Each structure stands twice: as structure tokens, then as C-alpha cells.
Amino acid sequence: MATERAIFAGGCFWCMVQPFEEREGILSVISGYTGGNVENPTYEQVKKHLTGHTEAVEIIFDNSKITYQSLVELYWTLTDPTDAFGQFEDRGDNYRPVIFVENEEQEKIAKESKAQLQASGNFDSPIVTSIETVQKFWPAEDYHQGFYKKNPEDYAQSSKIRHDFLEKQWKK
């Protein structure tokens, strides 16, 4: 088994876990923070914009069962790639959409996929999701991990606006 890592930011990390976790070949999905300038940041620090971090998910996957390309394609369907200032009801730089790449191959795949999405005409506005070099990933506190399983009612309520947008946008 050959493992690889992908890191995606798409608003609140709670809403990013389940869609990836349910795919065959996914070994783990961890909610956390990346891209900032403070070691081992806390949720309270990040949400107050004190660290420069973005909420993200770290995905460890078996690349013989699922490709990085397929993860990027799934990522697009979970976000509004035209909104650089947060996602849905989650606003601010800590919720910005970013594909963090670890190597030239991931960067190539992400950039080509972004260009294809822009050319598709599915969105009236430009695709503004950033593609950035990965930085240190810090796992979030335990109560954030697997939030959708631990708190299904809260998860359903907090993800409703996202789900409504995604259903409308991707069913075109």
C-alpha cells in the first residue's frame, strides 16, 4: 500500500470530513489548522484571527485505491470556489478555500483541475480558490474530530447553507 497526503481547506472543517471519509481508499481524515505563524494553535486563537491559520482537513489515502485527482475533483463539489473570503456562513481568512500541495505532481493536478473548472462555465464568477505549498498541519482539538458523527444534529444545522448551495450548484 502506498500512502499519500492531501490537505484541503474549504470553510469549516466539520463539513469537509464526511465526504472524504466515506470514500474507499481513505485511511484517515483529520480536522486541523495550517498556513499560520503560531505553533500548535487552538480553535479559539484561529477563530479570533490571531494566528493566520486556515481550518483544513488532512487526508491520508491509499493511492492505489483512490487518486489525488479524484480527491481534488471531490473537493470542488464541496466548496464555493468563487468565494475567497470564506465559505457559506463561515467568513474570514480562516475559512478561505485552499488546495495545499505537497509536490509538483499535486500542484500540476490542482492547477489543471482549477483551469478545467473555470473553463467549464459552471460558475459565472472566476475560480479564486488558492493553490499553495503545504505548511505544517496542526490537528484540531479532539472535540472537532469526527464532529458529524458525535453531533449529528449540530452538524446538520451548521452545514445546511452549504448543502443547499452545493445541491443547487452541482445539479445543473
Image: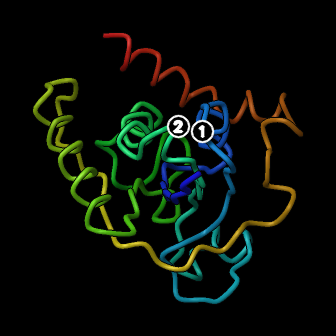
Q: Residue at x 35, y 42 (%)?
A: 69
Q: Residue furthest left?
A: 119
Indicate the quadrant where residue 45 lies.
Answer: bottom right
- Name which of mark 1 and mark 2 comes first in the sequence: 1
What residue type is disc 2 on? Lys
Residue highlighted by disc 1? 25
**Do the CB atoms of the residues marked 1 and 2 lie less than 8 Å apart?**
yes
Q: Which mark is residue 65?
A: 2
**Residue 122 vs residue 18: left or right?**
left
| Rendering coords of residue 169 (x, y %) | 36, 20
**Residue 137 vs residue 127: left or right?**
right
Indicate the quadrant where residue 48 lies.
Answer: bottom right
Please tell me whether residue 172 is drawn above or below residue 46 in the rendered image.
Answer: above
| Rendering coords of residue 107 (x, y %) | 27, 61
Q: Residue at x 16, y 36 (%)?
A: 116
What residue type is disc 1 on? Gly
Please tell me whether residue 23 is drawn above or below residue 9 in the rendered image.
Answer: above
Please tell me whether residue 110 is drawn above or below residue 5 in the rendered image.
Answer: above
